[in-house]
Image: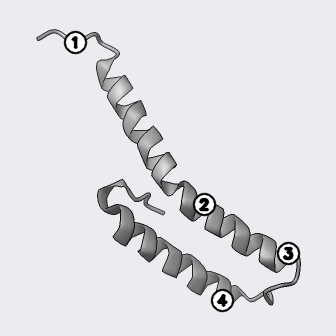
């Protein structure tokens, strides 16, 4: 079967789009955390921020499996 030369690129683009869409809730959580710090609801702490980032990354990895983004 002969596929157009753009087929591999379209498959790659579809995979990337899927990954970004599935990761959207995690991006929203990161943004909400940043806003909570910005508005003073959470105390600014590098250690707490790093722990939050690691926890969220682990949750994303466990939830999305192969579709999870790599940092």
Q: Alpha carbon of mark 3 to alpha carbon of mark 1: how far? A: 50 Å
Q: Tell me the crowding category of disc 3: few under 14, some 14 to 19, or many 20 or more residues within 10 angstroms, Cα based.
A: few
- Determine which residue is flagged by label 4: 48
> Which mark is drawn over residue 53?
none
Quadrant location of the N terminus?
A: top left
The residue that appears at 37% across and 61% down in the rendered structure is: 64
Q: Alpha carbon of mark 4 to alpha carbon of mark 2: how far? A: 17 Å
Q: Nearer the viewer, mark 4 or mark 2?
A: 2
Q: Nearer the viewer, mark 2 or mark 1?
A: 2
- Determine which residue is flagged by label 1: 3
- Determine which residue is flagged by label 2: 27
The residue that appears at 37% across and 39% down in the rendered structure is: 15
Q: Tell me the crowding category of disc 4: few under 14, some 14 to 19, or many 20 or more residues within 10 angstroms, Cα based.
A: few
Foreground pick, 63 / 55? 63
- Determine which residue is flagged by label 3: 38
Q: Earlier in the sequence, mark 2 or mark 1?
A: 1
Which type of secondary structure does the marked residue at label 4 adopt?
helix
Q: Position of residue 47 (x, y in %)?
A: 65, 90
Q: Alpha carbon of mark 1 to alpha carbon of mark 4: how far? A: 50 Å
The answer to whether residue 14 is above or below residue 50 is above
Q: Earlier in the sequence, mark 3 or mark 1?
A: 1
Instruction: Left or right? Give the position of 8 relative to 70.
Output: left
**Which picture quadrant has residue 40?**
bottom right
Q: Tell me the crowding category of disc 1: few under 14, some 14 to 19, or many 20 or more residues within 10 angstroms, Cα based.
A: few
Give yes or no for contact between labels 4 and 3 (Cβ–Cβ under 8 Å).
Answer: no
């Amino acid at each position: 079967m002969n596929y157009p030369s753009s087929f591999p690129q379209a498959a790659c683009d579809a995979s990337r789009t899927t990954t970004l869409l599935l990761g959207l809730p995690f991006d929203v959580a990161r943004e909400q955390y940043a806003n909570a710090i910005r508005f003073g609801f959470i105390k600014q702490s590098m250690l707490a921020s790093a722990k939050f980032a690691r926890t969220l990354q682990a949750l994303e990895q466990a939830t999305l499996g192969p579709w999870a983004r790599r940092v």
